[in-house]
Amino acid sequence: MDRVTAVDPLRTAEIIAVGSELLGATRLDTNSLFLSGRLASLGIELRAKSVVGDDRGMLAVVFSQALARADLVLLTGGLGPTDDDVTREVVAGVLGLPFTEDPAIVATIERRFARRRMRMPENNRRQAQVPRGALVLDNPNGTAPGLYIAHDAKVVVLLPGPPRELQPMMARLCESLLGARAGGERSYTTSAFVTGRSESHVEEAIQPIYSRWYDATPPIQTTILAAPGQIEIHLTLRSADPGAARARLDEARDAIAAALGDAVFSTDGRFLEEVVGDLLKARGLTMAAAESCTGGLLLSRVTDVPGSSAYVRGGVVAYSNDLKTAFVDVPADVIAQQGAVSEPVASAMASGARTRLGADIGVGITGIAGPDGGTPEKPVGTVAIAVAGPGGAEQVRTFSFPGGRAQVKYQSAQAALDMVRRGILNGDW
Ligand code: AMP
Ligand code: MG
C-alpha cells in the first residue's frame, strides 16, 4: 500500500555565504540581502545568516548548526571548479551523501566552453559532481549549477556566488520547488514614513495602537526604523488569505497615520522628494532653490525623480556671501548685520531664487554643517530654511540638527522639502 507522507511546510531559514573574500575588508555579502527579501515574500522566517571563508572545517561546523536550527538552509558561493570551492563537498559530507558524476552537466559545461572555442579544463568536472538525491538547478548564466537537496523534513539549497547567476535561479525556485514547500502563508508588509518627529515621539504616539496588535489574530509586527530626517514604520503580517491580509494591513496603517497626522508624508513607500514632486505636478507649480550648506543636495534629490523637469526650474549653489548677493540678490548689509546663517538671509535667498529663476516656489537654505564654524549662539547644525511662494507667502524656520556634516546636509534638504510639502497641503502656495 502506498503511504502518502504529508511534508511540513518550511517555516524557518538560515543563509550561509561562503567565500574568504567576504571576510576581508573590501567585499560585502550582498546575496543574503536579495535572498532575505525572497524568503520574506514566501513567508519563511529568516532566523540567522553567517559568512564563512573557503574553509572545510569551519563550513562543516556552521552548516551543521544551521541545519539543526532551521527548516531551510541556503548556501551561496563556493561552487566553482577550483580547490578552494568547497561548498558542494562539505554539504554532501555533513549529510552523508555519496557523489556521482552527472554526464548531462559535463556535456552542458563542455558546450559552454566550445561556444567560446575552448576545451573544458578537467577541473570543471567537479561542478558535475551531484550528491545522491539532489536536484540539479540549471544555470544559464554560468558554469556552476545549483543544487536542491530534500533531506528528511529539511531542505538545503546551494546557489552560485555571482549575483547575476544566483538571482534568476532563486527566482525560479520560489516559483517552483521552494514556493511549493513554503506552505500557504505568505508575508505581507506596508509602511508609513514620517518626518519632522523624533523616534521617541513617534513611538509615544503609536505604541498604544500597535501594542493591541501583538495578540490579534493574525498578529501584526511593527518595526520602527530611524534614519536622519526620516522615521519609517513597517507593519508585517502573515496570512494565507491575500485579500484579508491587505485589508487588515491597510486598516492598521491608516490607524497609525491618523495618530501621526500630517507628519506622515507617505503610506506607499514613496520618498519625500517623490511626494513633493507629485504634489508640485498635481498643482501645476514649479520650484527653484538657492542652497548654501546643502551644496545642491536638495536639487540633486529632487532631480533624482524621473519626470522632475516638469516642475524643477533650477537652482544655484550660493556658498560664499558675495555669490548670495550676486546670484539671488541677498542684500550685503543683511548678511553683514544678521550673519550668513540667519532667517533674513534664508528669506532673501528663497525670494531671490523664486524671482531670479522664475519659479512659483523658491527655497533658501543656509546653515552650519560643521565640524567647524559653530559659535555659542549658532552651534554646528544650526540651519535657517525659507520657502517663498506667490503673493508674498513665506515661511522661515531655524533648525538645530544633530549629527555630522553629511547628516546635517541631508536633514536640511529633508526639512526644506517638508516645508514645501506642508505649504502645498495647507494651500499657502
Ligand atoms: P564563487 O561562487 O564562490 O566562486 O563566487 C564567485 C563570485 O561571486 C565572487 O568572486 C564574488 O564576486 C561573487 N560572490 C560570491 N559570494 C557573494 C555574496 N555572498 N555576495 C555577493 N557576491 C558574491
Ligand atoms: Mg568563492
Image: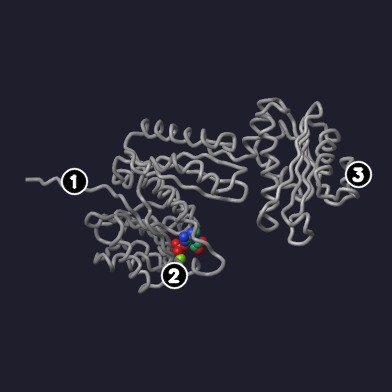
Horizontally, residue 15 falls left or right of residue 377, namely left
At label 3, the amino acid type is Ala
At label 2, the amino acid type is Gly
Residue at mark 1 to residue at mark 2: CA–CA distance: 37 Å
- Is disc 1 placed on a helix, strand or loop? loop
At label 1, the amino acid type is Ala
Residue closer to the observer: 424 or 318: 424
Q: Residue at x 29, y 46 (%)?
A: 181
Closer to the chain start, of discs 3 and 1, is 1
Q: Quadrant of residue 194?
A: top right
Residue closer to the observer: 401 or 33: 401
**Label 1 crowd bin: few (<14), some (14–19), many (20+), radius 10 Å:** few
Up/down of 299 relative to 67, above or below: above
Location of mark 2 (residue): 53
Horizontally, residue 163 falls left or right of residue 328, namely left
- Is disc 2 placed on a helix, strand or loop? loop
Residue closer to the observer: 65 or 349: 349
Q: From where the camera sits, is residue 63 visible?
A: yes
Picture coordinates of residue 19, whole percent (x, y): 45, 66
Colouring style: one colour
**Label 2 crowd bin: few (<14), some (14–19), many (20+), radius 10 Å:** some
Viewer-nearest of discs 3 and 1 = 3
Q: Quadrant of residue 66?
A: bottom left
Location of mark 3 (residue): 326
Residue at mark 3 to residue at mark 2: CA–CA distance: 59 Å
Location of mark 1 (residue): 6
Q: Residue at x 27, y 63 (%)?
A: 100
Picture coordinates of residue 407, whole percent (x, y): 66, 54
